[in-house]
Image (cartoon, helix red, strand yellow):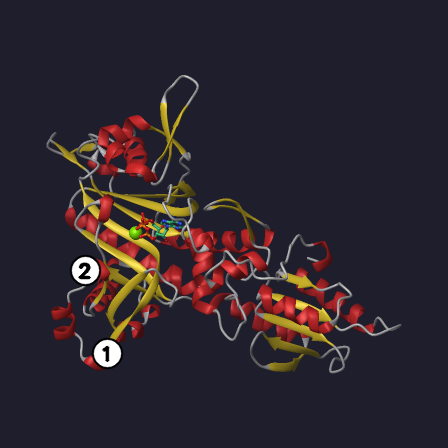
């Protein structure tokens, strides 16, 4: 892509309504525009990053055998009356009537709808287990939408649902998701801590919130800092290996505010290992057994002809929240730097312009074409802005690498700079190698 063609409405000043860094930056870098309180349009740069995050979330769901489908945003009130949540959910639910006066709602989550789909399709225990998910917009009429995309009314979420025959099997599904979540956040360049959490309005027995550390987070956390050293790359996605990993996490104290008990914390965690800080909830998983299958009559036939309610869990990841959360976690020295896996572009080419001499620009175009051919996502700065203004802009956009064509470049060696990091003089082949390698490791 050529910078001059890009739709990227950069703002000079930080909008006063934006209180946290991610909100300020996303507005300034032309990633989002507020349409009304808590409702945003996603402009090309922001949208592109969100789509890359979505794709990583999707790949990790697929890896554990979850199957993608797509449910609508608008749901009928009926199934919510069956589950009893139509009244319980309260004011956060956006209720709508169609022209026939039928009660509808904009889905804040999908337990009811997926249960309804499942009960009308699956009859036998032989069809279990199943893991289904979709990635779809949700609406919650938050009382105080704030922090840009971190807490808004309309947001993009991955929600998965597991269906099993009994508690033991359901635990395996839960642990698979637990593993998929850790892998997902790792690929996004984040360290997420799974924390024993309250189940809230979803209800149920077991639940973990996945929290990334950030001062601006809304969740207060209490944990044993050794939990940060667990290396998930040693674990594959076979049941045994996942169970081992789960055990490693369970060894360490890690809870949010609602489950915090000072006495237990001080007894279990030595002073030097205590980590008390704030974090952002980027995912939340629940096991709730037959909480929905029972009222909604979602059962399967057993071998002996008896019926049993299926055991369910639900698993959310805030895809749109993650865009802001990554900024909050990665922001450094006034510069935003995207992990290569989700960067809007993997590398920027910045030719410095000299009067009556377009050598640098011609070199830049040649590199650009070669990178495009190798499927590298690259942005070429073809504007004639002042160099300092260019660098300011690239600091703001946060593309992790730059190829700078200036006094140090020759026909086959180029200045390759890591944003906020070191500069090397490399050949194009060497640069390609680094970029492709980064894509997988962050
Ligand atoms: P929170 O405690 O932050 O209000 P929640 O517990 O109500 O979230 P869940 O129902 O667990 O949210 O939703 C799954 C995920 O969706 C959350 O972990 C979060 O990442 C994201 N999410 C929830 N509410 C919002 C929102 N208002 N704006 C953006 N993302 C959200
Ligand atoms: Mg939650």
Left or right: 263 as drawn, with respect to 428: left
Q: Position of residue 53 (x, y in %)?
A: 47, 55
Taking depth in this image into account, of 352 and 245 the one nearest to the observer is 352
Residue 365 found in image quarter: bottom right
Taking depth in this image into account, of 245 and 13 the one nearest to the observer is 13
Answer yes or no: is residue 67 visible.
Answer: yes
Front tag of 2 and 1: 2
Left or right: 58 as drawn, with respect to 132: right
Residue where numbered disc 2 is placed: 259
Q: Position of residue 264 (x, y in %)?
A: 12, 69
Q: Residue furthest top?
A: 100
Task: Give the Cα distance between marks 2 and 1.
Answer: 19 Å
Residue where numbered disc 1 is placed: 273
Q: Residue at x 42, y 53 (%)?
A: 146
Q: Earlier in the sequence, mark 2 or mark 1?
A: 2
Taking depth in this image into account, of 70 and 143 the one nearest to the observer is 143
Circle 1 crowding by C-alpha within 10 Å: few under 14, some 14–19, many from 20 = few
* Image quarter hosting the N terminus: bottom right
Quick check: 424 above or below 286?
below
Answer yes or no: is residue 237 visible.
Answer: no
Q: Residue furthest right?
A: 356
Q: Residue at x 80, y 68 (%)?
A: 362
Left or right: 48 as drawn, with respect to 371: left
Q: Residue at x 53, y 68 (%)?
A: 336
Quick check: 29 above or below 233?
above
Q: How many marks?
A: 2
Quick check: 170 above or below 193?
above
């Amino acid at each position: 892509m050529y910078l001059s063609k890009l739709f990227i409405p950069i703002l000079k000043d930080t909008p006063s309504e934006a209180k946290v860094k991610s909100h300020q930056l996303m507005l300034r870098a032309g990633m989002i525009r507020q349409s009304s309180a808590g409702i945003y349009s996603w402009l090309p740069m922001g949208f592109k990053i969100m789509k890359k995050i979505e794709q990583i979330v999707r790949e990790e769901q697929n890896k554990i055998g979850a199957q993608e489908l797509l449910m609508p945003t608008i749901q009928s009130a009926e199934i919510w009356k069956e589950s009893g949540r139509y009244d319980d959910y309260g004011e956060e639910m956006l209720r709508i009537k169609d022209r026939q006066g039928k009660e509808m709602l904009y889905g804040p989550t999908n337990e009811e709808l997926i249960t309804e789909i499942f009960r009308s399709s699956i009859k036998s225990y032989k069809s279990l287990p199943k893991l289904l998910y979709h990635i779809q917009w949700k609406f919650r009429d938050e009382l105080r939408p704030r922090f840009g995309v971190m807490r808004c009314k309309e947001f993009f979420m991955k929600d998965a649902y597991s269906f099993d025959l009994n508690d033991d099997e359901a635990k395996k599904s839960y642990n698979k998701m637990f593993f998929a979540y850790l892998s997902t956040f790792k690929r996004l360049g984040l360290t997420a801590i799974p924390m024993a959490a309250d189940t809230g309005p979803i209800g149920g027995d077991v639940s973990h919130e996945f929290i990334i550390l950030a001062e601006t987070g809304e969740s207060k956390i209490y944990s044993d800092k050794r939990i940060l050293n667990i290396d998930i790359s040693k674990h594959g996605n076979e049941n045994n290996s996942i169970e081992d990993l789960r055990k490693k996490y369970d060894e360490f104290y890690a809870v949010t505010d609602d489950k915090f008990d000072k006495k237990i914390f001080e007894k279990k965690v030595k002073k030097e290992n205590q980590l008390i800080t704030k974090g952002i909830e980027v995912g939340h998983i629940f096991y709730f057994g037959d909480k929905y299958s029972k009222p909604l009559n979602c059962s399967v036939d057993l071998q002996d002809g008896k019926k049993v309610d299926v055991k369910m869990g639900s698993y959310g990841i805030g895809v749109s929240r993650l865009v802001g959360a990554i900024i909050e976690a990665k922001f450094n020295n006034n510069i935003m730097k995207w992990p290569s896996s989700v960067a809007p572009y993997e590398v920027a080419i910045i030719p410095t312009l000299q009067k009556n001499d377009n050598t640098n620009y011609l070199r830049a175009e040649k590199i650009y074409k070669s990178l495009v051919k190798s499927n590298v996502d690259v942005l070429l700065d073809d504007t004639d802005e002042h160099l300092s203004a260019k660098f300011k802009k690239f600091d703001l956009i946060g593309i992790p690498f730059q190829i700078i064509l200036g006094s140090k470049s020759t026909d086959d060696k180029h200045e390759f700079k890591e944003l906020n990091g070191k500069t090397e003089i490399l050949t194009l082949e060497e640069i390609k190698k680094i970029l492709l390698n980064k894509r997988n490791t962050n």
